[in-house]
Image (tube, grey):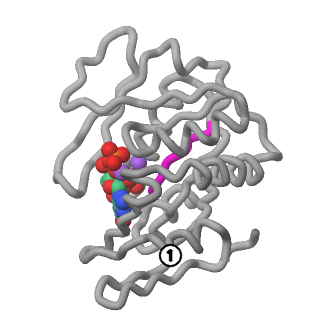
Amino acid sequence: MNFLEAKILADGVVKPGNVLKVDSFLNHQIDIRLMKKIGEEIKRRFSDVEFNKVLTIESSGIAIASAVAYVNEIPVVFAKKGQTVNSTDDKYVAKAYSFTHKKYNEIFVSKPYVKPTDKILIVDDFLADGEASAALIDLVKQAHAELVGVGIAIEKGMQPGGAKLRAAGVRLESLAIVESMDAESGFIQFREQES
Ligand code: G4P
Ligand code: NA
Ligand code: NA
């Protein structure tokens, strides 16, 4: 078991509807020592590839993406969310479907922050249905930047996001992959991974 899996078992709370609450260390209060370790571990897993920028989406991706950027001493850009963003000459805009709200949300970045010369590592706290990652990849493509990979803290292996990205040939590294969980007993099972 790695340090993040251990932290999830110690302090994560399984809620009905396959929701893993990690408010005490990731989504509300942020454990900065843990962020540093996550940043270092994502850096290690992508140590064979070059990237010069981290891209995430507001809001809960920012802390972990900042940790990855910090240990690599590179900038982090976060895509912003809007209800309906008017496409303008100065923004790239992508749609992300929200299963929670049953509607499309738009996300955008200002063009100067994602350039054709950028080698981008996408980082997020959760990978569930993969809508956020797909929208971020869309932004990278629109900018004609290079996508180096996707680094995730917690992948929910019972939802299709990870399988979709892997099938699309995207290099994906998830530090913890939850294979199954049960709200009543609090049981959480992780997928075995090579470390
Ligand atoms: P995606 O990120 O793979 O597209 O996932 P999806 O659309 O299914 O999830 C919507 C939101 O819920 C995302 O945050 C995602 O990080 C979060 N999420 C999904 N499953 C869980 C879970 O089990 N536990 C927790 N804590 N979060 C989960 P968001 O709507 O983009 O919001 P924000 O918090 O970043 O503002
Ligand atoms: Na979130
Ligand atoms: Na997120």
The amino acid sitting under disc 1 is Ala
Compared to 189, does 36 lie above or below? above
Q: Describe residue 77's horizontal placement relative to residue 175 as left or right.
A: left
Compared to 38, does 90 lie above or below? above
Is-magenta flag for residue 45?
no
Picture residue at 56% right of the left edge, 36% below the top: 66
Q: Viewer-proximal residue, 3 or 188?
A: 3
Residue stretch in magenta:
121-126
Query: Which secondary structure lies at badge 1?
Result: helix
Q: How many circles with numbers are drawn on the protein?
A: 1
Compared to 107, does 179 lie above or below? below
Residue at the farthest bottom position: 185
Residue at the farthest right position: 48
Q: Describe residue 172's horizontal placement relative to residue 135 as left or right.
A: right
Residue 154 locus on image (x, y percent): 51, 62
Disc 1: which residue? 10
Q: Describe residue 80's horizontal placement relative to residue 174 as left or right.
A: left
Image quadrant of residue 130?
A: bottom left
Q: Give the position of the N terminus as an image quadrant.
A: bottom right
Main secondary structure type of the part rendered in magenta? strand
